[in-house]
Image: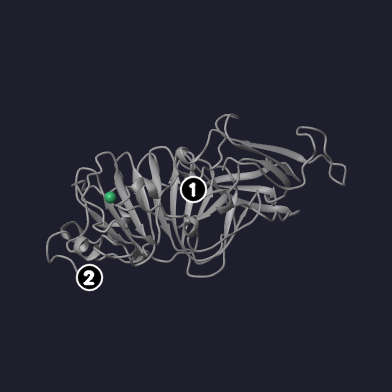
Amino acid sequence: MPFYHHLGEVPRKRHTVWRQPSGELYHEHLMGSFGFSGPESLLYHLRPPTSILHSRTLRELSWQHDADLTLRMRHFDLNKVAKSKSCTLDRTPILFNHDVALQIVEPTATDEFLYRNAQGDEVVFVSSGAGVLQSQMGELPFQSGDYVVIPRGILHRFQLGEQPTRFLIIESTGQIRPPKRYCNQFGQLLEHSPYCERDIRLPTELPVYDQTGEFQIVVKHQNLLTEVVLDHHPLDVVGWDGFYYPWILSIHDFEPITGSLHQPPPVHQTFEADGFVVCSFVPRLFDYHPQALPVPYNHSNVMSDEVIYYANDEFMSRKSIQYGSLTLHPFGLPHGPHPGRAEASIGKQRTEELAVMVDTFQSLNVSRQALDFEDPDYGRSWLPGKHVD
Ligand SMILES: [Fe+2]
């Protein structure tokens, strides 16, 4: 997130002599992006972050996609995904392309290791649960409804608290950022943005772990999970400053933009990345023109696949949708409200819907694992009498 933050102690001048009470130098560590031209932070460790005892391949992540590419509407019931132990090792891929991957996980235990995704940024949508994100840049409490944004390269771990925990993980090849049109030339969020800097939560505590021994981290790189063992606790940062760190925006702090007539999907945009956008549908007043038709018109996403994850049971234009549903409306087919939804919406004052939408500019693959949760009748649910309330 491009605004300056710092925690702990740092020397007055960067790249200068700064010693620990023992006389040893602190170990400076620049974490930069885009070849030292993008956002970066400067960290100070008790011990060198380079002291690796050994490493080994844990697992290859070779995702297979559904061989049946027949164009059709898809609906997956993610409530059927089994609970698993690890937030990191047990993720189930649902949809993916070269720009973005959507995964679901319901972890029951905090990982013993720290994790670094070295090949992509992650937005972890907390569909349920609460706890604390531990990271090299400090601790950040999270709760249901949070988008936890973790730029690549940052070591972290989700300490689980309130259960059950369900994370929808949006993994991005490009950097996750606020939409450019929300920001001025200096990066400040503008008045028309649905959220501002006050809504963004940053790490607030920086515990320092001064421990030696064998400490495991897991790194995702080249679609491999690699175990790396360090000779010290990796959360040994005494201070840092810069523009590169994990941050949180709650979907409940996204202030909806409404109008007298139906507002198009871009008003819901929350993040942009390369090849896709993330939007938030939140409780809001409906359109206030006396003849307004609040549900969306039929529309053709001629340049994007549309994915919606339903974070509660209400969605104004759909029937047979429940908390935990995920739909894929691919380009090539128009989509719109289910039968009866347009009539039913007339005169309605507000909606309580809560959903996360991901629109991708290239087609998505459906993973083979997702077929276990698929509703095969969804594609015919727009026919009169073919759906259940
Ligand atoms: Fe749509």
Residue 304: percent from the left, percent from the top? 29, 42
Q: Residues within 10 Å of mark 1 (few under 14, many from 20)?
A: many
Query: Which image quarter: residue 355?
Result: bottom left
Q: Is residue 310 left or right of residue 379?
A: right
- Residue, disc 1: 122
Answer with mark 2 or mark 1, whichever residue precedes in sequence.
1
Looking at the image, residue 312 lies above or below residue 63? below
Q: Quadrant of the C terminus?
A: bottom left
Looking at the image, residue 317 lies above or below residue 10? below
- Residue, disc 2: 389
Query: Which image quarter: residue 207?
Result: bottom right
Residue 126: percent from the left, percent from the top? 48, 60
Residue for point 55% across, 31% down: 34
Tell me the element at label 2. Answer: loop
Residue for point 32% across, 47% down: 264
Query: What is the three-letter code of the residue carrying label 2?
Result: Asp
Q: Is residue 113 left or right of residue 170?
A: right
In this rendering, does residue 200 appear at all?
no
